[in-house]
């Protein structure tokens, strides 16, 4: 069983030298009384928060129950889809397609109580269930509908807009009838946002030296909703362009994951005068919405109101690059690694 681990804690932008491909022997026969399940991993999710789990957490920042710290040398868990190859658990049979907490490797031994469910692909590719129909999708859905409470016609700004969560937030907002502007890190991404995903407008934040006036230009009547995936300077600029009773969903602060100096310092006087609601959230708290989210998103996919956007690389050895590239903006949509062919 080949798997990826970290050689050391990572407190800056991740590099190839931080990772290692290891192998261990794994017997595919199980004691029937073990209650364990062995899953052949097919697709695994690559997510920015994994980097936060790799930090040393020496002083102020702590590992949390939501992002359990990874010890160098250990295998690394991640959401994924796989196929059962051996089962001592009566709920699963050999051959079942499952989704749950797997490993960044070729196989996962799921212990009793581990997060694992049978998966009905509902006619969609299995990879969709890692991204658009999995946790990234739920994050976009819960964050946009529950936290932002959008109304038709409102003006919505999304950062990291061509990323896994961001592109869906923008697409949900368009289906609802909002005016949507996204920002992303290249002109190719900007073109995709406007031409493929139907955003009303988009800009490359790397070309904009003064983000506050950039947002004024794109939102002359102000922003009602900001879906924040990046934190840092963009969050400050967004706060100063928000309308009265605006809402900000703080989904992620990726600009701070590799650079702790980058923390946002939004103007609190704006927050007060404009009665802005700023709320952080964790998708895992909204599992109760999973059914609604899934049926809405499947309908939108079938009627082509929204487009899936996936960025798939192949093989367990491609996992480090996949993660590294998230912090270089080199993914287009949901980053997934296909461990092996179905
Ligand atoms: P993405 O697919 O959006 O990939 C990350 C993107 O972030 C990159 O493509 C890049 O795009 C952008 N980026 C990278 N570094 C920087 C930087 N320094 N400044 C600005 N942008 C940067 O990832 P996800 O959609 O999976 O995640 C988006 C955010 O949502 C992350 O912050 C993540 O941690 C958070 N998240 C939160 C969850 C929750 O429950 N709260 C659940 C899932 C994700 P570009 O070219 O535009 O720079």
Image: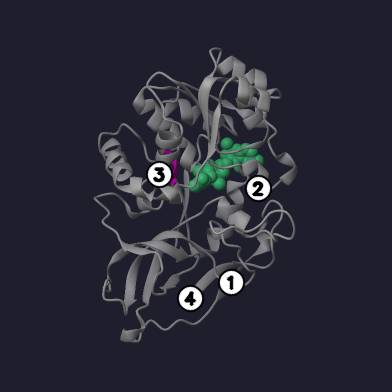
Looking at the image, tell me whether mark 3 or mark 1 is earlier in sequence order: 1
Residue position marked by numbered label 3 in the rendering: 137
* Residue shown at 43% from the left, 71% from the top: 108
Residue position marked by numbered label 4 in the rendering: 1
Q: Quadrant of ligand 1?
A: top right
* Residue shown at 66% from the left, 21% from the top: 212
Looking at the image, tell me whether mark 3 or mark 4 is earlier in sequence order: 4
Report the span colored magenta.
Answer: 136-140
Residue 342 is a magenta residue = no
- Give the vertical position of 90 relative to 100 (above or below): below
Q: Which of marks 3 and 4 is in front?
A: 3
Q: Nearer the viewer, mark 4 or mark 2?
A: 2
Looking at the image, tell me whether mark 1 or mark 4 is earlier in sequence order: 4
Looking at the image, tell me whether mark 2 or mark 3 is earlier in sequence order: 3
Residue position marked by numbered label 2 in the rendering: 257
- Give the vertical position of 32 relative to 227 (above or below): below
Residue position marked by numbered label 1 in the rendering: 74
The image quarter containing residue 116 is bottom left
């Amino acid at each position: 069983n080949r798997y990826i681990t970290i050689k050391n804690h990572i407190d800056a932008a991740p590099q190839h030298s931080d990772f290692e491909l290891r192998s261990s022997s794994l017997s595919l026969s199980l004691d029937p009384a073990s209650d364990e399940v062995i899953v052949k991993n097919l697709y695994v999710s690559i997510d920015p928060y994994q980097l936060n789990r790799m930090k040393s957490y020496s002083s102020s920042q702590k590992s949390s129950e939501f992002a359990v710290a990874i010890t160098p040398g250990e295998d690394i868990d991640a959401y994924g889809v796989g196929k059962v190859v051996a089962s001592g658990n009566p709920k699963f049979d050999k051959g079942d397609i499952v989704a749950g907490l797997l490993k960044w490797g070729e196989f996962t031994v799921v212990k009793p109580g581990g997060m694992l469910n049978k998966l009905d692909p509902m006619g969609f590719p299995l990879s969709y269930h890692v991204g658009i129909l999995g946790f990234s999708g739920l994050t976009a859905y819960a964050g946009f509908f529950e936290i932002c409470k959008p109304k038709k016609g409102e003006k919505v700004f999304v950062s990291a807009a061509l990323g896994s969560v961001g592109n869906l937030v923008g697409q949900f907002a368009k289906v609802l009838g909002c005016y949507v502007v996204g920002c992303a890190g290249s002109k190719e991404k900007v073109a995709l946002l406007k031409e493929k995903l139907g955003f009303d407008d988009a800009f490359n934040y790397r070309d904009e030296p003064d983000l506050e006036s950039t947002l004024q230009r794109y939102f002359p009547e102000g922003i009602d909703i900001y879906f924040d995936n990046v934190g840092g300077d963009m969050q400050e600029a967004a706060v100063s362009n928000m309308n009265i009773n605006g809402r900000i969903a703080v989904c992620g602060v990726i600009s701070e994951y590799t650079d702790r100096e980058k923390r946002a310092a939004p103007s609190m006087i704006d927050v007060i005068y404009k009665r802005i609601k700023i709320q952080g959230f964790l998708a895992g708290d909204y599992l109760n919405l999973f059914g609604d989210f899934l049926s809405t998103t499947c309908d939108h996919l079938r009627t082509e109101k929204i487009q899936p956007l996936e960025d798939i690389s192949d093989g367990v050895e491609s996992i480090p690059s996949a993660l590294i590239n998230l912090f270089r903006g080199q993914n287009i949509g949901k980053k997934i690694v296909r461990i092996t062919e179905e």
